[in-house]
Image: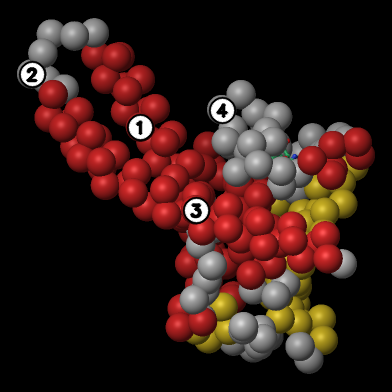
Amino acid sequence: AEDILLRQEKLSVVGELSASIAHEIRNPLTSLKGFLQLLKGSFEVIPSYYDIMTDEISRIESITSELLLHAKPQAHNFHQENIQELTNHVVTLLSSQALINNTLITVNSTKIPPINCIGNQIKQVLINLLKNAIEAMPNGGDIKVDLAVTSNKEICIHIADEGYGIPKEFLNKIGLPFYTTKEKGTGLGMMTTTKIIESHGGRMNISSEVGKGTQINVYLPIEPILS
Ligand code: ADP
Ligand code: MG
């Protein structure tokens, strides 16, 4: 038990540190991007160089925004949120990406009470999980999202895809920093997702079958105990 506590303490120090570094990197990055935009058009340079630079800056941006989520969440940021609305919002956000990839996301929900959470962080969790689901189906397919109350204290967000699945031997690698099987992946999505769920007092389990698809259950307490 001592080991676990020590590990958690180390992880939270690393989290705080990476979040504050990420914060410091953001401003210079934004100005870099702005000036690059201005330069485009003023010099005779192969245009694709600008696109490469812009792409790479966007990549740094997405890594830093993932890392920013690792700061310890503040109690005053927790609010009562309608998870059904929040989920529909995220599905709308991702609808163009889903369409391009021939995937259809459907949301089913029973009546859910408001959840005390950091809305933007739960949105981020849904974005990360749904993006992975879309990316797991290069030839398209269905993604089902089910929202349900599992007890008087907890809700469950169930996400199922029909993608390529995760081999058993790699399941325990999911969520390790920088673990990715994608050419352009960051390997930070699942780490951030796990971290956010834990800081909300929730938990997540993954089951998967290669060639069939992946199911993810996220359990969130309706009223988390905040320290
Ligand atoms: P990234 O998406 O940038 O690769 P993530 O942390 O989001 O990083 O995911 C890590 C890895 O977990 C992915 O590269 C993929 O191998 C695996 N993975 C996550 N979700 C799924 C899924 N729904 N289906 C198949 N593999 C998945
Ligand atoms: Mg991902």
Mark 3 to mark 2 CA distance (whole Å): 39 Å
Q: Residue at x 24, y 35 (%)?
A: 33
According to the image, label 4 marks what residue?
A: 184
Residue 103 in view (yes/no): no
Find numbered disc 4 in the image and state the secondary structure of the residue it sits on: loop
Find numbered disc 3 in the image and state the secondary structure of the residue it sits on: helix
Pointer 4 residue Cβ closer than 8 Å to ligand 1? yes
According to the image, label 3 marks what residue?
A: 17
Q: Amino acid at mark 4?
A: Lys
Q: Amino acid at mark 2?
A: Ser
According to the image, label 1 marks what residue?
A: 57
User: In front of the other: label 3 or label 2?
Assistant: 3
Give the answer, above or below, for where 111 lies relative to 88: below
- Give percent across and percent down for residue 202: 72, 72
Q: Earlier in the sequence, mark 4 or mark 3?
A: 3
Instruction: Please state if 195 lies on the left or on the right of 42 as rendered.
Output: right
Mark 4 to mark 3 CA distance (whole Å): 25 Å
Which of the 4 image quadrants contains residue 57?
Answer: top left
Depth check, front residue: 164 or 21: 21
Q: Residue at x 18, y 9 (%)?
A: 45
Mark 1 closeness class: few <14, some 14–19, many ≥20 residues within 10 Å = some
Q: Earlier in the sequence, mark 3 or mark 1?
A: 3
According to the image, label 2 marks what residue?
A: 42
Q: Amino acid at mark 1?
A: Ile
Mark 3 closeness class: few <14, some 14–19, many ≥20 residues within 10 Å = some
Mark 1 to mark 2 CA distance (whole Å): 20 Å
